[in-house]
Structures are given as C-alpha cells and as structure tokens.
Amino acid sequence: MNAIPVLLGLLFLTPESALAAEGMKGLDLTNHWVGFAALALFVGAYGLVMAEEFTHLRKSKPVILAAGIIWALIAWIYASQGFTSEAEQAVRHNLLEYAELMLFLLVAMTYINAMDERNVFEALRSWLIKKAFGFRQLFWITGLLAFFISPVADNLTTALLMCAVVMAVGGDNAKFVLLACINIVVAANAGGAFSPFGDITTLMVWQKTLHTAQGALDFWSFFNLFVPALVNWLVPAAIMSLAVPNEQPAQGGEMVTMKRGATRIMLLFLLTIASAVGFHNFLHMPPVIGMLTGLAYLQIFGFYLKKTYHRDCEIKGQLCSTDEAVHDGQMGDPVAFDVFDKIARAEWDTLLFFYGVVLCVGGLGFIGYLAMASEVMYVQWGATQANIAVGLLSAIVDNIPVMFAVLTMKPDMSMGHWLLVTLTAGVGGSLLSIGSAAGVALMGQARGYYTFFGHLRWTPVIALGYVASVGIHLWLNSHLF
C-alpha cells in the first residue's frame, strides 16, 4: 500500500461534524466537485502558509479566505439539496472548538506579554550574558532552560528568549549559534510535549477530556511523558555538544532589572494555571473558564499598579517625579501597564491562522474525508504505527490540523496511545526547521546562522532522539497500553 496519499489525506481531517453528533447523515461529497474544490483551496492556502518566509504574506490571510469559501460551497450545495440547517450546525460546532482554545491561548499570551513588559525575560537574558559561561556551558544551559520554561511559557516564546541569549553571546561564532539554535528548538518542543500548556496540541488533547480503559486523560497524566520528552532532547543534545566550540565568549552588556510587580505577575500566572486545572479537574468545567478568571487577577493587579505607583517612586531617600521613575526603569510606566494593551500585543496572526485551519479542516471533514483516513490509519495500520506517522507528518506541516484530525476521529485507543500521539505530534516538528513554530521563528531571528539546511544536517541525530523517546514511552508506560 502506498502510504503517501494516506499521510497527505491526514491533512484534511477535522473536528467531527455536528451532523454526526445529532445522529443525522450528511451528504458524501468526497467524489463531488465541491469536495475536490475544497481540497484544492486548502492545499493552495497551505502552500502559501509554508511559503510565508519568501512571500511575506502573513499565514492567517490565505487560510481565513479558504475557510470562508469552503464553507460557502458546502452551505450552497446543502441548501440546493434541501438541507437548510445542517451546515450551520456543523460550523457552529467548529466555532465552539476554536473559541475555547483561542480564549485560553489569548490569556496565556497576555500574561507572557505582561511579563515581557515587566522585563522578566530581559533580566534573565542579561544575567546569563553577564556570567562567564563558555560556549559548551551555554549550549547546555539554554537547552535546559528551554526544556523547563516551555511547559509554562509555550515553546515559541521560550525559543525566542533563549535564541536572544545565544545571539547576544556568540553572534560572531556561526557554528555555536547553529548548534545552540537546533538544541533550543529540540528542547523547547520536547519540553512543551509533557505539559498541557507547552503546545497547542497538548492543550487540545487536555481540553478534550478523553476517557480510556485506564481512566480519564487528565492534567497529571501528561507528566508520564516527562522522561520520554527528556530523552528526546538529551540524545541529540549529547551528540551535538561534542561539536560545540570549546571557547569562551566575550562578556559585555548591561544588567537589566525587573520592573515593579514582575514577581507578583509570575505568581499570578501560576495561580491562573492552577485555576484552569482546578476548574477542569474538580469542577468539570472547561479549562478556559479558569484561564479567563485568571485574566481578572491580572486586570485587578494592573489597576493596583496604576493606583500605587507613587509608593515606589523614591530614589536614594528623595521623592522623584513619575517621569523620572519611569526613566529609571524600576517601576515601569503606570499608564502603559494596561491589560488591554497586552491583549492587543498577542500573536493575533497565530490565533487567526488557527481559526482558518480549524474552519478549513472542519469543512473538509464535514465533506467526508475523515472516515476514509480513519479506516486506513487506525484499523489497517494500527494505533502505534499511525501515531508514529503523525509525528513524522508534523515535521512537514503544522501539527495543529494533524492533532485535530486524530482527536476528532476519536479512535478507540488506550491512554498510552493517546499519550504517544501527544508526544510524537509535539516532538516530530523538531526533525525539520520548518516543522514547528519555534524553528520557523528562529530562522528569522538568527537569519544566516540557523538555516533549513543547517538543521537538516543534524536531522539524523534528532531522529535518534525521536526513536529513543518513542521506545522509552512504549517501555516505561507499558502499563498504560
């Protein structure tokens, strides 16, 4: 059997249709011109997404346009056959799926932007630069930090922060920058795979509240992936570290201090995460409700910062004006700390891209491609082979539609297999520089140093980590299968 068409077909899987949820039978459009047109629209739009680096066309634009046209075609053909509400029910179902994830991510992005404005990340970067670490030490330190920060701050933000450190310290040493960037991408993706907050795909799995023979896949279940994820990073890191120059970089740069309230915002973020977990695990509510409650914590604290800025406006025993305190950098602009400004700075292109993907693949799944791929992958291939293939596919295309596909097919899998596909979808993107948001972002940030072909030379080593992590999971968590 030729596996390539089936793998490509996985792109077109989607949230299950509302028709199926209501027990109604929809039209099979898989061999209809509308189905073929929808496929062509999605492939064309996704081609533009992959070419964003060259066209400079933001990735959200083509997929949003394609989503609108696909659903217009579906609604038109359904209406012409006398079905006036089925398409509407299906698209509302997809919108609900998207809204929960979008609001969750929006709160997380708002907290990250607030911490960025309070100089949390700059303070960490300047501290690392000031220390007399050699290139090999920095290679391991940035990788270790990427692995442990990404479960909370997400893999993209973490990778950008660590790359800034690498560029500031070793920007003139091309070999070190390349190896360090590859290490950061692998570490950030691996760290994001064992936490519901580390990647969009893990978040989607957690919010689905999947039930298996071994019990519900709850928040703590993901930590079964900690050791496999750690192995996924350590195997290639240990090999690549041998090629890192054993040199000492030049020191420099000024120390950056965090602004007033930075530590408290970090604590509020942890409290927000705890709220999301509590709402989901104990109150059986969507995690997004806990996250939005946590946004209120930040809003109220922002109000407190603006009302009490004068308390910290004392330098060397003398009162200073607001402008002087702001210029000193110790407290930050009290007016500038506006939660809605942090919301406006969120990655709206990413959020809208996510909308376009969900609606596009939602429409393609409603057409009827879901059942076809589900039969081949999870019945003919088997769960283990199918889930490993998901990871390989995520190295080529975005893992969001791939994971949505698996989730909405709802194959009858054990907890171990659900964790396996969570792991492979999260770390599979490390095989190529274009396979994850972290890799794509670092190609822009370290342009000329970290490149597609530079990463490709180390793909066999990264693949060793991928195989080792899958093997460790199958062995260590065998009781979950």
Image: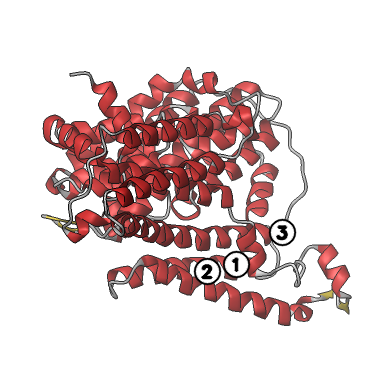
Q: Earlier in the sequence, mark 3 or mark 2?
A: 3
Query: For the residue carrying disc 3, how many other residues have a C-alpha within 10 Å: few (<14), some (14-19), or many (20+)?
Result: some
| SS at badge 1 | helix
Q: Quadrant of residue 95?
A: bottom left
Q: Which residue corresponds to the image point at 46% horizontal and 58% vertical from the top-left? A: 102
Q: Nearer the viewer, residue 472 or 17?
A: 17
Q: Nearer the viewer, residue 28 or 454?
A: 28
Q: Is residue 298 visible?
A: yes
Say what amino acid the circle numbered 3 marks. Answer: Thr
Label 3, label 2: how far apart the Cα atoms are: 18 Å
Q: Quadrant of residue 31?
A: top left
Label 3, label 1: how far apart the Cα atoms are: 11 Å
Query: For the residue carrying disc 1, how many other residues have a C-alpha within 10 Å: few (<14), some (14-19), or many (20+)?
Result: some
Say what amino acid the circle numbered 1 marks. Answer: Thr
Q: Which residue corresponds to the image point at 61% horizontal and 58% vertical from the top-left? A: 113
User: In the figure, is residue 114 to the left or right of 417?
Assistant: right
Q: Is residue 459 above or below residue 218?
A: above
User: In the figure, is residue 20 to the left or right of 176?
Assistant: left
CB within 8 Å, label 1 to label 2? yes
Residue 263's tag is 1
Image coordinates for residue 290, horizontal then vertical, percent: 41, 71
Q: Nearer the viewer, residue 209 or 311?
A: 209
Q: Is residue 125 above or below residue 247?
A: below
User: In the figure, is residue 263 to the left or right of 149?
Assistant: right
Image coordinates for residue 257, horizontal then vertical, percent: 72, 59
Image coordinates for residue 54, horizontal then vertical, percent: 62, 27
Q: Which residue corresponds to the image point at 70% horizontal and 37% vertical from the top-left? A: 168
Q: Which residue corresponds to the image point at 76% horizontal and 66% vertical from the top-left? A: 330
Q: Which residue is mark 2?
A: 267
Q: Is residue 101 above or below residue 37?
A: below
Say what amino acid the circle numbered 2 marks. Answer: Leu
Q: Which residue is mark 3?
A: 257
